[in-house]
Amino acid sequence: AQTVTQSQPEMSVQEAETVTLSCTYDTSESDYYLFWYKQPPSRQMILVIRQEAYKQQNATENRFSVNFQKAAKSFSLKISDSQLGDAAMYFCAYRRTPSTSGTYKYIFGTGTRLKVLA
Amino acid sequence: KAGVTQTPRYLIKTRGQQVTLSCSPISGHRSVSWYQQTPGQGLQFLFEYFSETQRNKGNFPGRFSGRQFSNSRSEMNVSTLELGDSALYLCASSRDGPYIEQFFGPGTRLTVL
């Protein structure tokens, strides 16, 4: 069974600094998708960035980038120039590609709470 | 385009009661998934519905059930509530196929006393 592990329950970063959130996963599949979702306090969860496993190039979205190491099954999120609005719970998620049966589901990690210090 | 909506936003129930939560997906989205979020456990997948059929199910007891209507709206029911059922219940909708992002609702905060 696939698993997603976020070993950092909480992290802090100074405003304007860079922080990296860790995520490891376990799967026997070769084709899948990885995601980082952000859940601000009392607000809805939104997608930050996603990575297709077959792509070697790391995904980037403005100040957010990932370090995808497929062999190591590692998928870390780097936030550059941290802003107060980045303070949130961050979830790493895995989703396999649809099999011939067409069924699949998302598997989430336990989350990392990011605090941004002014 | 309206986002995913969930009703009610807050619920307080007592042990043994049952509860029904509702989720309206984004227009055009046929897949609806439900998650239970608790501190320290992250998001636990409950089930997914697609075109009125349960397509995937997580490891939750039979007290947790759901359904989806022809307009893709979904309901989740929990019977015989237990204290441990207190959680934020999130609904997420998506179109089908690969590369598909899930769009989450604001959640229903259920407190069982």
Image: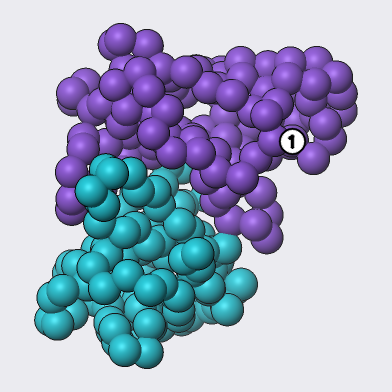
Chain colours: A cyan, B purple
Give the image quarter of residue B83: top right
Q: Is residue A10 left or right of residue A2?
A: right
In the depicted structure, whether residue B39 falls above or below residue B34 = below
Q: Is residue A42 visible?
A: no
- x, y percentage for residue B107? 52, 33
* Residue occupying image coordinates x 80% and y 21%: B80
- x, y percentage for residue B58? 55, 43
Between B45 and A86, which is closer to the camera in this rendering? B45
- x, y percentage for residue A27? 41, 72
* Residue occupying image coordinates x 29% and y 84%: A70
The residue beneath circle 1 is B85
Q: Is residue B68 left or right of residue A9?
A: left
Q: Is residue A1 visible?
A: yes
Give the image quarter of residue A69: bottom left
The residue positioned farthest toward the front in the image shown? A100
- x, y percentage for residue B41? 65, 57
How busy is the neighbourhood of tag 1: few (under 14 within 10 Å), some, or many (20 plus)?
Answer: some
In the depicted structure, whether residue A12 falls above or below residue A99 = below
Between B59 and A10, which is closer to the camera in this rendering? B59
